Amino acid sequence: MLTDIRLRSQQLADPRFDDPKRLVAWMGAIQAQDYRMAKWAVGLRLKSAMPGSVEDALARGEILRTHVMRPTWHFVAAEDIRWMLKLTGHRVRAANESLGRTHKLGFTEEIYLRGNREIGKMLAGHRYLTKQEIKVLLGRAGLPSEPAAVTRFLIRAETDGLVCSGADRDGKPTYALLEERVPPGPELTQEEALARLADRYFQSHSPARAEDFAWWSGLPVTEVRLAINLLGTALIREGEWLVHASCRDIPVPDVLHLLPAYDEYLISYKDRTPVLAPEHHSKAFNRNGIFQPVVLLDGRIVGNWSRPAKKGDTGIEISCFEPDQYLCPVRTAEAERRYITFYRDRR
């Protein structure tokens, strides 16, 4: 059954990892523009999501948050960041520059390189700075420093392999120099990188289609086809689906999870109808690319959830798409407990 295989491959049933870094490496990358929710996306997939475990891995630099593949934030394992940037960074860079021109921030190459030099100087010596602090220093250096301009400079610095995420400070993300955060590793050829990325995707997202991998990775069709061919017998074709040979097609236990916004279970596929009825798509995500927190029940997305904004209120509000949808109270309470325990008093 498609959903049984996918739940296992996504580590949402019978999870195999205790270590956040190993989980992120298994997934290949985890979309992470909603920083708080992305941490839960990792914690949710661990055998035991201890409070602070994901933050600790981020602080140690075992997991990094950067723009890679599609031009959005992702979590990646530290040892993967360089070969991933080499494979996809130029596409993210081009998208960043195109977006800059749309906002009338079409910087010259000279301005981008000057921005890199200034950012490199301000972060040197293991100095971790927030985006706001970098904004102030760029302005003092005489460079454009409005928020959109700072975003353009930082994405360029990320895709050039200059910066990555540093340790959080007072709950806020910071930037650090990649060369000070992650030691150099073996370089991969383009074919090796393509094969590795495809292997990571299909082992953690099967069953999936070639177009799903193209959407997730941002790679062109020619490179997607090459990557799939490079995997050979590691991928099994079942009709329109590709299934990684490591996946097990056996029934999964009952599953009820509170999935975060932008969770890989939904966002990493071009076609989401196998797990979400088309009439409910607008309740889970919109045309502007905004994805909501959703309820996962035995492989299907059946509702939304939210945590009240009022401080001190530890409840979870759940609204099902169908009025007659039944959620087992015991399983629902356990899903809520896991989320609340993961964050404790963090809001």
Image: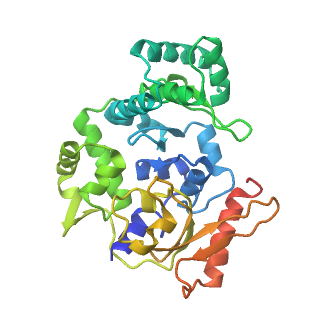
Q: Nearer the viewer, residue 317 or 160?
A: 317
Residue under the point 66% across and 57% down: 50
Residue farthest right in this picture: 312
Viewed as shown, does residue 274 lie left or right of 77? left
Q: Position of residue 33 (x, y in %)?
A: 53, 46
Q: Position of residue 156 (x, y in %)?
A: 45, 26
Residue under the point 55% across and 52% down: 19
Specify the color scheme: rainbow
Q: Is residue 274 above or below residue 76?
A: below
Q: Nearer the viewer, residue 37 or 200?
A: 37
Q: Quadrant of residue 138?
A: top right
Image quarter (top left, top right, bottom left or bottom right) of the C terminus: bottom right
Q: Nearer the viewer, residue 22 or 170?
A: 170
Viewed as shown, does residue 234 lie left or right of 201? left
* Residue 91 visible to the viewer: yes
Q: Is residue 180 above or below residue 91?
A: above
Residue under the point 77% across and 56% down: 345
* Residue 177 visible to the viewer: no
Q: In this view, does 147 lie above or below 17?
A: above
Q: In this view, does 285 lie above or below 168?
A: below
Q: Position of residue 62 (x, y in %)?
A: 54, 40
Image quarter (top left, top right, bottom left or bottom right) of the N terminus: bottom left
